[in-house]
Image: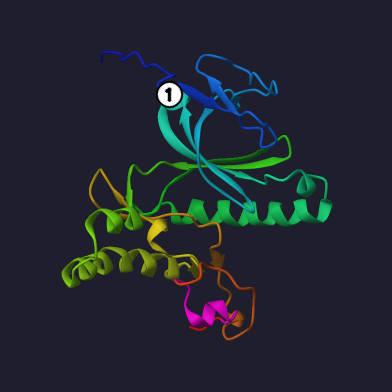
Amino acid sequence: MALKLVNFSTYPMTYCFNPACENPQNPEGVEFCLFCNSALWLRNRYRALQVIEEGNFGRTLLAEDRDRLSDRCVIKQLFKWRKVQDSTQAMAKVSRAFEQEAALLLKLGTHPQIPTLLACFEQDRRFYIVQEYIQGQNLLEELLDQGIFSEQKIRDLLNDLLPVLKFIHEHNVIHRDIKPMNIIRSHGDGKLVLIDFGLAKKLQPNALGKTGSRYGTEGYAPIEQTRGKVYP
């Protein structure tokens, strides 16, 4: 079998993993951030290429894994803010969220329409979840490109996605943030992939009907969810 030479610096910039870095973009080929001197390779394996999303609980980055022939991956970094790292109580909360999401992704990632969990670890008081990168277009982008979906297309979407929801519900898990941005149509096989299980929760039988925290995105979350109620 012939070996293929891989250029690990296919992106012109490398993004610093240090969330406090004020100038995180670095030229290719450097090992340490030119601004804050942080190592640019996480675990000497992962290189961040760009930020995909930032939120209150951290950020999600597109990255590259040089142990897997420069395959793309997605790295979720928790927690971004310094005040959280200095708070034992807040760090404990983030740690629980990290462990919960990692456990769910390990179990649910066996489904072909849910990203596979590749690694999870803690480094420098920051938590990292590494997932399979799904190359494709989310449904919001697809809607903006194509306009209003036809009835038949909506039926096709539901036929493709509902078995995925059935799978996660059979594992007593609720996603809690299903919206067009969290559904990607894979460029590979055209299948819909459900992403971002950061708010997902394992549902306990005795929780049915009880009041809880409010999660989800306004405009997409069901009424009972916004009211903090759980029903079968």
Q: Quadrant of residue 120?
A: top right
Q: Is residue 182 left or right of residue 81?
A: left
Q: Is residue 164 magenta?
A: no
At 22% from the left and 66% from the top, the residue drawn is: 149
- Residue 40 locus on image (x, y percent): 60, 24
At 73% from the left and 57% from the top, the residue drawn is: 93
Query: Is residue 171 positioned above or below 212 on the image?
Result: above
Instruction: Name the kind of residue labelled 1 in the image.
Output: Tyr
At 52% from the left and 82% from the top, the residue drawn is: 224
Q: Look at the magenta stretch and give its main secondary structure.
A: loop
- Residue 59 locus on image (x, y percent): 58, 45
Q: What stretch of residues is rendered in magenta?
A: 220-229
Q: Quadrant of the N terminus?
A: top left
Q: Which residue is mark 1?
A: 11
* Helix, strand or loop under label 1: loop
Query: Is residue 66 positioned above or below 164 on the image?
Result: above
